[in-house]
């Protein structure tokens, strides 16, 4: 039996490999803005993370987005993203 391969992405927070559907995409667009991409279709460099505040907190601590986007990501941006996913969770 051949199993269908599910493309896995690594969460920037907990570093676990998960299916795309379990993660959300965070994108850095051409203007350099970093946003939660709920459509998964926004242009720009993307990174994946669980829809979980704890993973965002971890990413903030380890500055995972700085590495993913190869730029300096201010703490405020992490806070903004955490707020955004907070609204999604509710
Ligand atoms: Zn995670």
Image: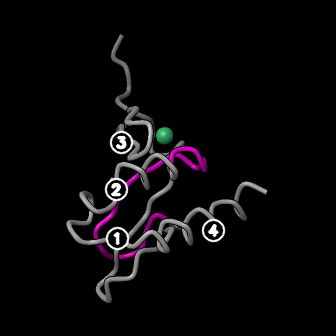
Residue ID for mark 1: 73
Q: Quadrant of residue 32?
A: bottom left
Which residue is tagged 2? 63
Residue at image x 43%, y 44%?
13
| Residue 9, numbered circle | 3
Up/down of 63 relative to 81, above or below: above
Of the numbered discs 1 and 4, the one sitting upstream in the chain is 1
Question: Do the residues under discs 4 and 2 have CB atoms within 8 angstroms?
Answer: no
Numbered tag placed on residue 60 in the rendering: none
Q: Nearer the viewer, mark 4 or mark 2?
A: 2
Residue at image x 20%, y 66%?
A: 70
Q: Identify the mark nearer the N-term, 4 or 2.
A: 2
Helix, strand or loop for disc 1: loop
Say which label, 1 or 3, has the lower sequence index: 3
Q: Bounds of the magenta span?
A: 40-55
Q: Does the residue labelled 2 lie within 8 Å of ligand 1?
A: no
Q: Is mark 2 on a helix, strand or loop?
A: loop
Distance in Å between CA atoms under marks 1 and 4: 16 Å
Cα distance between the residues tagged 1 and 2: 8 Å
First reached walking from the N terminus: tag 1 or tag 2: 2
Q: Would you say residue 54 sits in the magenta stretch?
A: yes
């Amino acid at each position: 039996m051949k199993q269908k391969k599910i493309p896995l992405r690594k969460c920037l927070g907990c570093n676990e490999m998960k299916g795309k559907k379990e993660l959300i995409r965070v994108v850095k667009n051409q203007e350099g803005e970093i946003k939660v991409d709920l459509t998964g279709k926004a242009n720009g460099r993307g990174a994946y993370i669980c829809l979980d505040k704890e993973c965002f907190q971890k990413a903030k601590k380890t500055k995972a987005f700085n590495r993913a986007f190869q730029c300096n990501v201010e703490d405020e941006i992490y806070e903004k993203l955490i707020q955004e996913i907070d609204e999604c969770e509710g």
